[in-house]
Amino acid sequence: MSSAQLTLLCLLPSLVVLWLLASQDPKRRRSLRLPQRQPRLPRTPGVALLLLPGLLLGGFGQWPALLMWMGLTLSLGWLLTQLLAWRA
Amino acid sequence: MSPKNSRAPLWPRWLLAGPLAALCAALIMAGGALWLPRGAAGIDNLVLPILAFPAIWAVLFFYACLTRHLRRAYALLLALLLAHALALGLQLS
Amino acid sequence: MLRLPQHQTKTLLAIHGWSAVLLGLLLYAVIVTGVACVFAREIADWSSPLERAVDDPYPRGTDMALRRLAATVPAQYQEELFFYPRAGGRLYAFFHRHEQDAGGKPVERGVAAEIDPLSLQILARREGSADALQRSERSNALADFMVEMHVRLHVPDPYGLLLTGVLGLAMLVAAVSGFLIHRHLLREIFTLRRWRAQRGADGALLASRDAHVLAGSWNLPFSFILAFTGSYFSFASAFGIPAMAMVAFKGDQEAMITAIVGHPAQEDRRMQATADLDAMLADARARSGVAPSFVQLEHWQRADARVTFFLPAQGSQLSSPTYVYDGASGAFVQEKPVLGLRPSLGGALADLMAPLHFGNFAGLLSKALWFALGFAAAYVALSGLQLWTQRRAESRAWRRLARAVHWVGYGLPLALIATAHAYFPARQSEVLPQEAMMQMFLLVAALSALAALLIRELAQLRRLLLLATAVALLGLPVLRLLCGGPGWWRALQAQLYGVPALDLLLLAAGIWCLWLIRSPGTLRMPSLRELRS
């Protein structure tokens, strides 16, 4: 499997977790005056879950995929926050 | 810096964090060639100090900025500085 | 989260802010040009394509073409040769010797040529020092201009490198201090109160603060990586290598580099024909499965000739070893790391610096990512400066800095795009592209400074500079076409896919600038009226 395929494979679960964390984030909801929700995924296990694909990539020595996964997760996290602030 | 000694002049700290930290980092880098192990390929003592220079400077800079024990910091940086200057002086003479 | 005592947080905040105020605008310039440099090769390919795409950068016959070139090169410059593909796939070959300038700095002087890999004809041939050759560069000049700006801000060595090294350290300080002072990094990682931007001066300040903190938090690991590796590159050549050479090699930098690379010092100056480079290229390709990215040949036509093939990163590695061949016999000698004859900690760490800084380890995907992360770092720098001046907007002096931030923030991208407008006509004429681009850059920088001085409201200045940028971006593909570049249909037929792709990106960026003019934006300086109310 190429580095790009590995990156995308690991990115998908990270994006789902990012979405869950962002959509239920209490401070974000409060700042946008949205009703608070009961968290479906508590923050600490959520962050651990978010980082898990990266740890696996590092553990298996897939360094290009690890860097790209990290870069994409961070860029898309920033983009997602921008979009959610726009929508609100 | 701290509320306790906020009236203390700032220049001793900036002298330490500015020129002294930079000079000390430069001398540690150059002096590293003399005391670092040469490694498997015989190049580590030349390559590692150049690689680590930004980190050496950053550590010294933040230490000098944040420490509450300015005299201790002066002593440490001057000791590092003098030790490396001495080693380099002996090597180059 | 880290909990520092209050006085330490205040100190860090002062360091974070003042380092940005003193160096932030120059740092922004280095980051913005760095973002462009990620695609330096693609920019060069787009600005100077050949008739059609080059499938093989080293086709059969490369050896013959190089020998034909060597026949025209004075013997004194045949000490060393390197060749690699550049703009449009042209094979750039440089026969040279190593000299020292008046200050003892190593200088390369010789004959450089561009070889068309499609016809194997020499397209251009120039003679001089490496610096002089770069000044008279034509096909690669646009990419070179961006790289020079990023690496040394067009300031002569060693001052330019020292300056960008210091800027790298400033970015490192900003990243570390930003991390330490931001106590609620995770708690606020999704908070952006954009809707407050239009609600008075306080709302604008809050929205700007969110925008800066948010971008800074998400970009923190990469800001750290880019700052560290960037300052390493600047300091290593400006200061690190000369200092270490002084300590260990009595100031002889060439001897130190030879020792670090790990080649034996034994010389055999007897004349002996260099073996077939095509055969060595084919062997290196068969061993590695890829075309080399760079080839170095020491001691052309000598018994001690040695050929080193540098390979691009592959598979799960961020860097690749080099292959060394005996130049006289053409036999494979060894596979070795770039630095040292065998793997070592120093060599491995040094190998990591380039892929981490350039993002060139996994083709276009990793480059696109580094482009995005660099863009985010530029946004962090600009939004931070804006936030600092916004917090102090009631003071006239800080409002002047806010004006400078707008001038550089929006004027610099405009000036950089304008350099491309100077490049295309200059390349068609006798004018040196580098000179034309620098004149255009300074002219546009001066004009935008004039606008910054004359326009009272910063929002209006922002709109004007964005409009000019949009016009420059939208006009660039047209200018390229008018100056003899291939149209989209012709480019597609010739498999020059990068040409329409970059044109489309420029057009999209132009449209985005137009959209930004309409959008009030998250970063907004409060108007004078708002401040007075």
Image: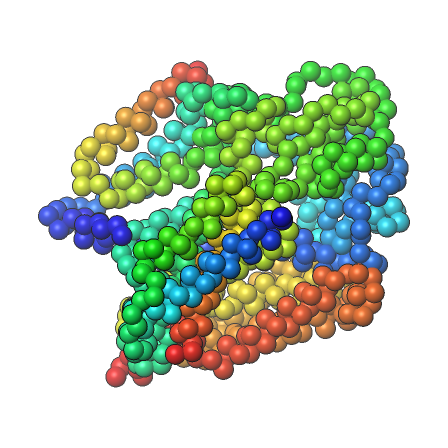
Quarter containing the C terminus of chain C: bottom left
Residue C22 visible in rendering: no
Whether residue A88 sits left or right of residue B43 in the image: it is left
* Residue at x 59% of width, y 42% of height: C316
Rendered residue at 74%/46% (across/down): C85
Q: Residue A60 in the image: x percent, y percent?
A: 51, 41
Nearer to me, C505 or C468: C505
Q: Is residue C452 visible in this depiction of the protein?
A: yes
Location of residue C239 in the rendering, given as x and y in whole percent from the top left corner: 49, 35
Q: Residue C453: which quarter of the image?
A: bottom left
- Residue A33 locus on image (x, y percent): 30, 78
- Horizontal and vertical percent for residue C268? 76, 16
Residue drawn at x 35%, y 32% is B24
Name the foreground residue: C68 vs C358: C358
Number of labelled discs? 0
Residue occupying image coordinates x 55% and y 78%? C514
Q: Quadrant of residue C20?
A: bottom left
Image vertical order of residue A70 relative to residue C382, above or below: above
In the image, taking residue C231 as reference, residue C444 lies left or right, namely right
Q: Camera-side residue: C100 or C532?
A: C532
Which color mode does the image show?
rainbow
Q: Which residue ends up furthest to the left in the rendered image?
A: B4
Q: Is residue C383 left or right of residue C512?
A: left
Q: Where, by quadrant of the figure, is residue B18 drawn?
A: top left
Is C503 located above or below residue B44 in the figure?
below
